[in-house]
Image (spheres, helix red, strand yellow):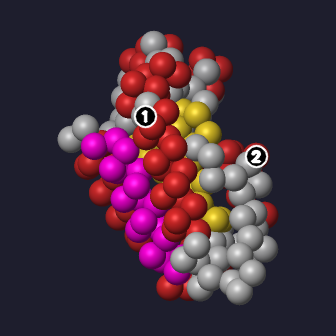
Amino acid sequence: MKPIHPFKRWLRHAWSHPRHVAALFPEKSLKHIEQVIADSEHRHAGEIRVVIESGLPSYAILRGLTPRQRAINLFGHLNIWDTEHNNGVLIYLLLADHDVEVVADRGIHRHVGEAGWQQICQQMEGMFRSGQFESGVVYGIQAIGEHLAKHFPPESVPRNELSNRVLVL
């Protein structure tokens, strides 16, 4: 993400609203994304969570909170770090900043590394720039699912440790 003047960033976030999320991700899209997560999790023992946020509150902007910091905060707050095999992954979209972050627990991160996650984020951001919002998220889930399937094959008794529901903030 290229630097933006703090006032311009504040304006972007001040004008963002959850209805912007609904415009880009209507209910049908959210349900499809949730189904893609469920289908992916049948092929591995990992957990994927998607959070879409329209914008940050003013106090967060004034503090200089970055999308990465917000994603890490949500990763902890939503207990994605607390999966049995340390293989939870968060896909976080911050629409006001046009940013995608992937935060992964240490069990899967050690296999994929920062470069692997950045490659997925860059592909998703490219799809978003061309207006392919639902497809971009689906791509991210599928790419992450491939890594999880390679390193964490499905268990004989599958479990779902985290909700598959897309969290819209």
* The N terminus - image quarter: top left
Identify which residue, 89 or 7, lies in the foreground.
Answer: 89
Tell me the CA gap for discs 1 and 2. Answer: 23 Å
Residue 39 position within the rendered picture, expressed as x and y whole percent measured from the top left: 52, 65
Q: Magenta span has 135?
A: yes
Amino acid type of the residue tagged 2 in the rendering: His
On screen, residue 95 above or below 35: above
- In this image, 132 relative to 154: left or right? left
Q: Earlier in the sequence, mark 1 or mark 2?
A: 1
Q: Residue beneath label 2, please?
A: 77
Residues in magenta, as a range: 132-149
Give the number of the mark in front: 1 or 2: 1
Q: Residue at x 46, y 26 (%)?
A: 22
On screen, residue 36 above or below 169: below
Q: Residue beneath label 1, please?
A: 25
Q: Magenta span has 148?
A: yes
Q: Residue at x 78, y 74 (%)?
A: 84
* The C terminus - image quarter: top right
Residue 164 position within the rendered picture, expressed as x and y whole percent measured from the top left: 63, 53
